[in-house]
Image: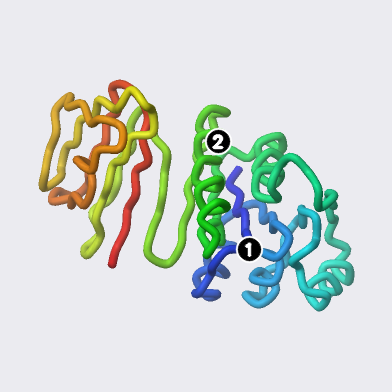
């Protein structure tokens, strides 16, 4: 089961959002992310959050369509994003794409990126996308298609660093250790039909990005 989580960060391409919504089994919007859904012509299956950023117009559309709302208090121990991810995991969704997870507030953006770790540890395939980036967290391996004009970066997450092999890239690695906070894995390119990132020890962000 594949799910789309629409959050209240930055979403520029509403046509892309609508296309993504047509490719999943379940759509959940986190609070103000509902506004993006409505503007894109999508009706989410559930709205979750403290409802401090959703517009009144969107709230009326949700109520008119009898869409369930899971409302939480503004003062709480988890963000709307984490509450939404927890809900989708508990629902048994095995692939979750987050859009609107990257925005102007670095604290929320970083916290959302780290939710990929929660998904990974719960056996869920997660990724965060925006107009220029797709972000994964990997602790085993991932195969990426070659896309012209895109870079691939591998960034260690563990303080103990990362041992990784890269195959099919301009700069290949074979069982190489990348230290935590090192930029060794930044701005690589896939040169074959696909690129293989194989993690032998540790875990990392794998970021596919363009200018």
Residue position for label 1: 8
Q: Residues within 10 Å of mark 1 (few under 14, many from 20)?
A: many
46 to the left or right of 178: right
Residue lying at 57% horizontally and 28% vertically, measured from the top left:
122
Residue 134's place in the image compared with 63, above or below, is above
Residue 25's place in the image compared with 94, above or below, is below
| 2 vs 1, front mark | 1
Residue lying at 66% horizontally and 69% vertically, measured from the top left:
37
**Residue 57 position by quadrant:** bottom right
Residue 65's place in the image compared with 170, above or below, is below
Residue 60, image x, y percentages: 86, 74
Q: Quadrant of the N terminus?
A: top right
Q: Residues within 10 Å of mark 2 (few under 14, many from 20)?
A: many
Could you say whether the residue bearing mark 1 is in a helix, strand or loop?
loop
- For residue 136, which numbered disc appears in the image? none
**Residue 47 position by quadrant:** bottom right
Residue lying at 55% horizontally and 74% vertically, measured from the top left:
14
Q: CA distance from mark 2 to mark 1?
A: 20 Å
Residue 45, image x, y percentages: 75, 57
Residue position for label 2: 119
């Amino acid at each position: 089961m594949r799910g789309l989580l629409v959050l209240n960060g930055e979403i520029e391409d509403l046509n892309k959002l609508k296309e993504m919504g047509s490719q999943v089994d379940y759509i959940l919007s986190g609070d103000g992310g509902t506004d993006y859904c409505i503007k894109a012509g999508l009706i989410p299956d559930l709205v979750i959050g403290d409802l401090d950023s959703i517009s009144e117009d969107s709230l009326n559309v949700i109520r008119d369509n009898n869409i369930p709302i899971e409302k939480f208090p503004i003062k709480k121990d988890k963000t709307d994003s984490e509450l939404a991810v927890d809900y989708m995991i508990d629902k048994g969704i095995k692939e979750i794409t987050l859009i609107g997870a990257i925005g102007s507030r670095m604290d929320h953006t970083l916290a959302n990126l780290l939710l990929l770790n929660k998904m990974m540890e719960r056996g869920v395939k997660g990724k965060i996308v925006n107009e220029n980036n797709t972000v994964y967290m990997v602790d085993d391996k991932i195969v990426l298609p070659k896309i012209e004009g895109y870079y691939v970066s591998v960034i260690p997450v563990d303080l103990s660093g990362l041992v990784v092999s890269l195959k099919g890239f301009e700069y290949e690695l074979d069982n190489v250790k990348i230290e935590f906070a090192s930029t060794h894995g930044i701005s690589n390119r896939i040169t074959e039909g696909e690129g293989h990132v194989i993690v032998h020890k540790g875990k990392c962000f794998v970021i596919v990005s363009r200018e």
